[in-house]
Image: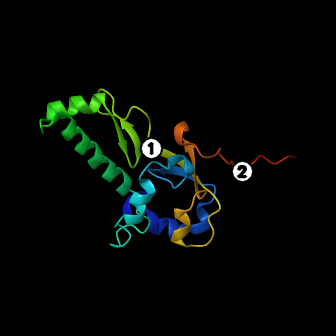
């Protein structure tokens, strides 16, 4: 599952998702309650526009990217690419998606792609995916909200 059809697929699959492990960019888990994220998600317009009923796939990071760019421009007071890049490599940015810091090649210094496991999904209501506990974060460790639930235990003979 990838892209803006994420919410539609989650809704269609419903409880068939339980125990499946996959990646995501943002999950409404307590470990991802960054300052400003809830306020951002309430005013997020993707759902109202009919683009993404959950407003979670791209919006938090797209907004965070603009926060990083704004802070960098203010930090160097220029639009010079080289100066912006240098500033971005040296600065930790406080965003709605948490603190973001870049390495020497522009990569995130800490992994941000989430490994999640679906749990407790009931029916096909999209609203349930806005609740904690439906997409338990397994990795990265700084955002981990639960341990892997192994659905297929070996049977004893």
Check disc 2 and report the residue beneath it. Answer: 152
Q: In terms of sequence position, does the residue under pointer 2 or pointer 1 come before the other?
A: 1
In this view, 30 is above or below 89: below
The label number, if any, that marks residue 60 in the structure image: none
Q: Is residue 92 left or right of residue 120?
A: left
Q: Nearer the viewer, residue 115 or 97?
A: 97
> Which residue ends up furthest to the right in the rendered image?
157
Determine whether the residue tagged by mark 1 lies in a helix, strand or loop: loop
Quadrant housing residue 52 = bottom left
Do callouts 2 and 1 mark residues in contact (Cβ within 8 Å)? Answer: no
Q: Nearer the viewer, residue 115 or 101?
A: 101
Which x, y percent locates residue 84?
Answer: 19, 34
Counting the numbered discs, the total is: 2
Q: Residue at x 50, y 54 (%)?
A: 27
Q: Residues within 10 Å of mark 2 (few under 14, many from 20)?
A: few
Give the Cα separation between the discs numbered 2 and 1: 25 Å
Determine whether the residue tagged by mark 2 lies in a helix, strand or loop: loop
Q: Residue at x 37, y 65 (%)?
A: 43
Q: Is residue 8 visible?
A: yes
Q: Nearer the viewer, residue 63 or 118?
A: 63
In this view, 101 is above or below 49: above
Which x, y percent locates residue 156?
Answer: 85, 46
Q: Is residue 42 left or right of residue 157?
A: left
The label number, if any, that marks residue 113 in the structure image: 1
Q: Residue at x 37, y 41 (%)?
A: 94
* Quadrant position of the N terminus in the picture: bottom left
Q: Residues within 10 Å of mark 1 (few under 14, many from 20)?
A: few
Quadrant housing residue 56 = bottom left
Which x, y percent locates residue 61?
Answer: 36, 50
Q: Is residue 5 visible?
A: no
Q: Residue at x 41, y 52 (%)?
A: 36
Which x, y percent locates residue 68?
Answer: 28, 43
């Amino acid at each position: 599952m990838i892209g803006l059809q994420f919410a539609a697929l989650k809704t269609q699959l419903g409880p068939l998702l339980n125990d499946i492990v996959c990646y995501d960019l943002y999950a409404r888990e307590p470990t991802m309650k960054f300052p400003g994220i809830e306020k951002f998600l309430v005013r997020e317009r993707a759902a109202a526009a009919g683009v993404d009923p959950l407003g979670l796939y791209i919006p938090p990071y797209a907004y965070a990217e603009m926060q990083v760019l704004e802070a960098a421009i203010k930090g160097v007071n220029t639009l010079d690419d080289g100066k912006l890049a240098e500033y971005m490599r040296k600065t930790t940015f406080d965003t709605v998606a948490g603190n973001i810091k870049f390495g020497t090649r522009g990569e995130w210094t800490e992994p941000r792609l989430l490994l999640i496991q679906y749990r407790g999904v009931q029916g096909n209501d999209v609203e349930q995916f806005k609740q904690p506990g439906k997409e338990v974060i397994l990795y990265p460790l700084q955002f981990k909200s639960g341990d892997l639930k192994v659905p297929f235990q070996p049977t004893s003979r």
